Image (cartoon, helix red, strand yellow):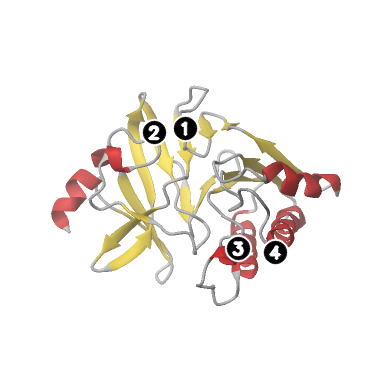
C-alpha cells in the first residue's frame, strides 16, 4: 500500500505528503460534548506532532475542513488560522480539497490567503498515481489509487471502537481505495463491522467485504492490520 498510517492520518513517503480528512472545524460549537483541551488545541497539537514526525512538504485535507453550512460558527476562523500557521511554521504547503460540508470554505480560507498564508483549495488533488478527493461523489479523473474520507470509518473490537483506515485493493474501477477516519475526534464514526457497500455514503465503496481495516494503536505505537471485512466479521 506504501502508506503510513498514524493518528487518523496517512503519510505518503514517496510524495512526502501528509493527508488528513474530515477535520470538521466548528463541530464543537454545535456539540454538548467538548474535548478535554478543546477542538482548536486538539487539532493543532496533533497535527503539529504529525508534522514533526514526518516532515512533509505538503499537508492535504481530503475534504470537510469545516463543519459550516449557512454561516461560520464562533471560533472557526481562529481555529483555521491556527491550523494554517501550524503547517506554515513546519515549512509545508496546505492544500484543502473541497468536501460536502465546506460550503463556507472560500470565505474562511480566503481570509488566510489574503494574509499571505500558503493555502490552496481544489476539487481533487493528484499525487503521482494517487488522487485525493473527499469521496462524497464519484471522481472526475482516473487514478491507480483514490484516497478519500467522508464516511468516518471505525471498527469495533471486543466492545471498543477504534477509528480505522480502510484499504481496498482494486475495488473501484480496478483502482485501489484508501479511506481515512475523521481527524476530528468529535466527529461520529460509522462502525463498519456489519456494513455492506450500500451502507456507505461514498460511491467509491463498491465491495465492502474486500476492505481491510487498519488501526493505529496509540498505546503500543504500532499499526494493526486486519483481514478484509468479509473475513474479519466471522472472527468477531
Badge 1 marks a residue whose secondary structure is loop
Image point (57%, 66%), residue name: 28
- Callout in the foreground (4, 3): 4
Residue 143: percent from the left, percent from the top?
48, 25
Which sits in the foreground, 13 or 21?
Answer: 21
Which residue in the structure is indicated by mark 3? Answer: 43
Which residue in the structure is indicated by mark 1? Answer: 137
Residue 223 numbered tag = none
Which residue in the structure is indicated by mark 2? Answer: 203
- Callout in the foreground (2, 4): 4
Q: CA distance from mark 2 to mark 1?
A: 6 Å
Q: CA distance from mark 1 to mark 3?
A: 26 Å
Residue 144: percent from the left, percent from the top?
45, 27
Name the side, left or right, on which 217 lies relative to 117: left
Name the side, left or right, on which 99 lies relative to 149: right
Badge 3 marks a residue whose secondary structure is helix
Residue 8: percent from the left, percent from the top?
48, 56
Please say if the residues under marks 2 and 1 sit with CB atoms less than 8 Å apart: yes
- Earlier along the polypeptide chain: callout 2 or callout 4? 4
Which residue in the structure is indicated by mark 4? Answer: 75
Q: Residues within 10 Å of mark 4 (few under 14, many from 20)?
A: some
- Callout in the foreground (1, 3): 1
Amino acid at each position: 500500500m506504501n502508506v503510513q498510517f498514524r493518528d487518523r492520518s496517512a503519510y505518503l513517503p514517496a510524495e512526502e505528503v501528509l493527508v488528513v480528512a474530515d477535520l470538521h472545524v466548528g463541530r464543537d460549537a454545535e456539540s454538548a460534548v467538548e474535548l478535554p483541551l478543546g477542538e482548536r488545541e486538539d487539532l493543532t497539537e496533533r497535527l503539529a506532532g504529525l508534522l514533526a514526525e514526518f516532515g512533509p512538504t505538503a499537508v492535504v485535507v481530503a475534504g470537510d475542513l469545516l463543519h459550516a453550512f449557512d454561516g461560520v460558527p464562533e471560533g472557526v476562523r481562529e481555529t483555521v488560522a491556527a491550523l494554517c500557521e501550524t503547517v506554515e511554521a513546519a515549512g509545508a504547503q496546505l492544500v484543502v480539497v473541497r468536501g460536502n460540508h465546506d460550503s463556507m470554505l472560500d470565505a474562511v480560507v480566503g481570509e488566510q490567503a489574503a494574509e499571505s498564508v500558503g493555502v490552496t483549495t481544489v476539487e481533487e488533488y493528484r499525487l503521482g498515481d494517487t488522487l485525493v478527493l473527499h469521496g462524497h461523489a464519484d471522481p472526475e479523473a482516473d487514478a491507480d489509487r483514490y484516497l478519500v474520507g467522508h464516511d468516518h470509518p471505525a471498527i469495533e473490537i471486543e466492545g471498543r471502537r477504534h477509528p480505522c483506515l480502510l484499504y481496498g485493493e482494486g475495488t473501484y474501477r480496478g483502482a485501489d481505495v484508501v479511506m481515512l477516519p475523521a481527524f476530528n475526534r468529535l466527529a461520529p464514526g460509522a462502525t463498519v463491522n456489519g456494513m455492506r457497500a450500500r451502507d456507505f455514503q461514498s460511491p467509491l465503496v463498491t465491495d465492502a467485504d474486500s476492505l481491510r481495516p487498519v488501526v493505529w494503536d496509540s498505546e503500543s505505537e504500532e499499526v494493526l492490520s486486519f483481514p478484509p471485512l468479509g473475513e474479519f466479521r466471522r472472527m468477531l
